[in-house]
């Protein structure tokens, strides 16, 4: 079952902040975040493992609440290069169950 | 390093024809995945493999078969193509100790 992402789309002005949410109905072992530019393959941003650790990557960070089976991706002071579609991917709680399931994506558009 | 290579990049089929998509990775990864991407549907998992000689079903396996005879190759087959299988197909391999997925460039398949 695919995780649910929200919002489906968001438009920001350069410099504004955004939050993208991902939730699952199943217990999770890990959450992945990827960004895809139009016509290209998805590119890895970060992975968060069970334990609630928050991770950061330049001005992009994420959190993982394993009790709520939710993750959020935070983009601060957005840049034009942040435009694209963001996908969260989730893996179940059984280590060794390597089925990585993605959400339907959030389209982010940054305008000058 | 080439990373993950998919062939062919584009293909047009008639309903009922068969074909095989080849995914090759040169990173010695154990886990490999096949996804299809359709507008508004995100990335949906077709089949995956956790090692040479193993395969498992994903979310949308019907109409597809896979094989992993060699560790570096993961083949996706369509025995009798249908218009509903028109899509962009992405192969990915997973780096075990970081969990990062490396995607191929995608294969655009049109079934008439």
Image: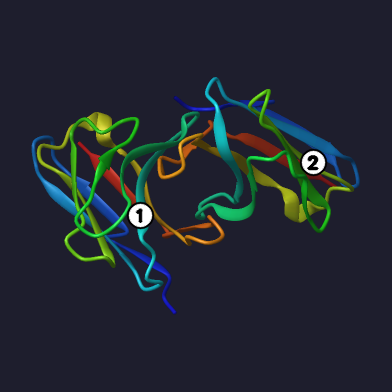
Percent position of residue B26, x then y: 36, 73
Looking at this view, is B48 or A37 the one in front? Answer: B48
Looking at this view, is B36 or A2 the one in front? Answer: A2
Colour setting: rainbow
Q: In this image, B33 relative to A105: left or right?
A: left
Mark 1 and mark 2 in contact (Cβ < 8 Å)? no
Separation of marks 2 and 1 at Cα, in angstroms: 29 Å
Q: Residue furthest top?
A: A25
Percent position of residue A19, x then y: 78, 34
Q: Secondary structure at mark 2?
A: strand
Q: Residue at x 22, y 51 (%)?
A: B54
Q: Residue at x 75, y 43 (%)?
A: A62
Q: Which mark is in front, 2 or 1? A: 1
Q: Residue at x 69, y 25 (%)?
A: A7
Percent position of residue B45, x then y: 37, 38
The quarter of the displayed image where residue A24 is located: top right
In the picture, the disc for residue B32 is 1
Chain of the residue that carries numbered disc 1 in the rendered image: B
Percent position of residue B87, x then y: 34, 40
Q: Secondary structure at mark 1?
A: strand
Write down the residue under mark 2. Answer: A74
Give the crowd class for mark 2: few <14, some 14-19, many >=20 residues within 10 Å.
Answer: some
Looking at this view, is A66 or B112 the one in front? Answer: A66
The quarter of the displayed image where residue B1 is located: bottom left
């Amino acid at each position: 079952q695919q995780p649910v992402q929200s919002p489906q789309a968001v438009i920001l002005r350069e410099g504004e902040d955004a939050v993208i949410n991902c939730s699952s109905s199943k217990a999770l072992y890990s959450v992945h975040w990827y960004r895809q530019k139009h016509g290209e393959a998805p590119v890895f941003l970060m992975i968060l493992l069970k334990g609630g650790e928050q991770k950061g990557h330049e001005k992009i960070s994420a959190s993982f609440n394993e009790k709520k089976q939710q993750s959020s991706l935070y983009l601060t002071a957005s840049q034009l290069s942040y435009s694209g579609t963001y996908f969260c991917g989730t893996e179940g709680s059984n280590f060794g169950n390597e089925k990585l399931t993605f959400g339907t994506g959030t389209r982010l558009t940054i305008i000058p | 390093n080439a990373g993950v290579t998919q062939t062919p990049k584009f293909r047009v089929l008639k309903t009922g024809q068969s074909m095989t998509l080849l995914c090759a990775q040169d990173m010695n990864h154990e886990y490999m995945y096949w996804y299809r991407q359709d507008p508004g549907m995100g990335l949906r998992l077709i089949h995956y493999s956790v090692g040479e000689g193993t395969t498992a079903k994903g979310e949308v396996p019907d109409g597809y078969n896979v094989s992993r005879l060699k560790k570096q190759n993961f083949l996706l087959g369509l025995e009798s193509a249908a218009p509903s299988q028109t899509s962009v197909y992405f192969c990915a391999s997973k780096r075990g100790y970081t969990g990062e997925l490396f995607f191929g460039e995608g294969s655009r398949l049109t079934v008439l």
